[in-house]
Amino acid sequence: QVQLAESGGGLVQAGGSLRLSCAASGSILSINTMRWNRQAPGKQRELVAAITSGGSTNYADSVKGRFTISRDNAKNTVYLQMNSLKPEDTAVYYCNADVRPTYALGYSRYWGRGTQVTVSS
């Protein structure tokens, strides 16, 4: 089994910062791309940022210059540093990862359960 667990969400004032973490655990052989997504109330889930195993990154236009994605391959963990937060960043943040389990021949995408981020004005 493979599990992803997010942490680090909470309530912050506009202009503040939060750092989210997502740790993958279980029978993992390798991890390719890791991503952060978010879903605000009444809206579709959207991709926020992604990072490949080699460290290449991409960001949604709405967070460029404010959010930074990084990863620690030794810990199977991805991070999202969020600065200059805005009320419109309020959402449940989910991580996902393309993982090859030890018992499989290929990669599958696994999701965490999400962590709430609330930015007050």
Image: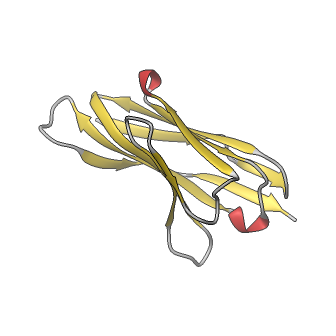
Q: Is residue 112 visible?
A: no
Q: Is residue 6 left or right of residue 106?
A: right
x, y percent for residue 41: 62, 73
Residue 59: quadrant of the picture: bottom right
- Horizontally, is 119 left or right of 59 in the view? right
- Residue in the picture at 65% in, 54% down: 116
What is the residue that sits farthest to the top in this orientation?
74
Specify how the rendered protein is coloured: secondary structure
Above-or-below relation of 2 to 13: above
The residue that appears at 28% across and 35% down in the rendered structure is: 1
Q: Quadrant of the C terminus?
A: bottom right
Give percent across and percent down for residue 6.
55, 42
- The image shows residue 20, relative to residue 73, as above or below, that is below
Q: Residue furthest left?
A: 105
Q: Residue at x 46, y 23 (%)?
A: 75
- Residue sitting nearer the eye, 98 or 7: 98
Give above or below for 42 relative to 120. below
Tell me residue 9's x, y (percent): 68, 46
Q: Is residue 63 left or right of 114 when viewed as pictured?
A: right
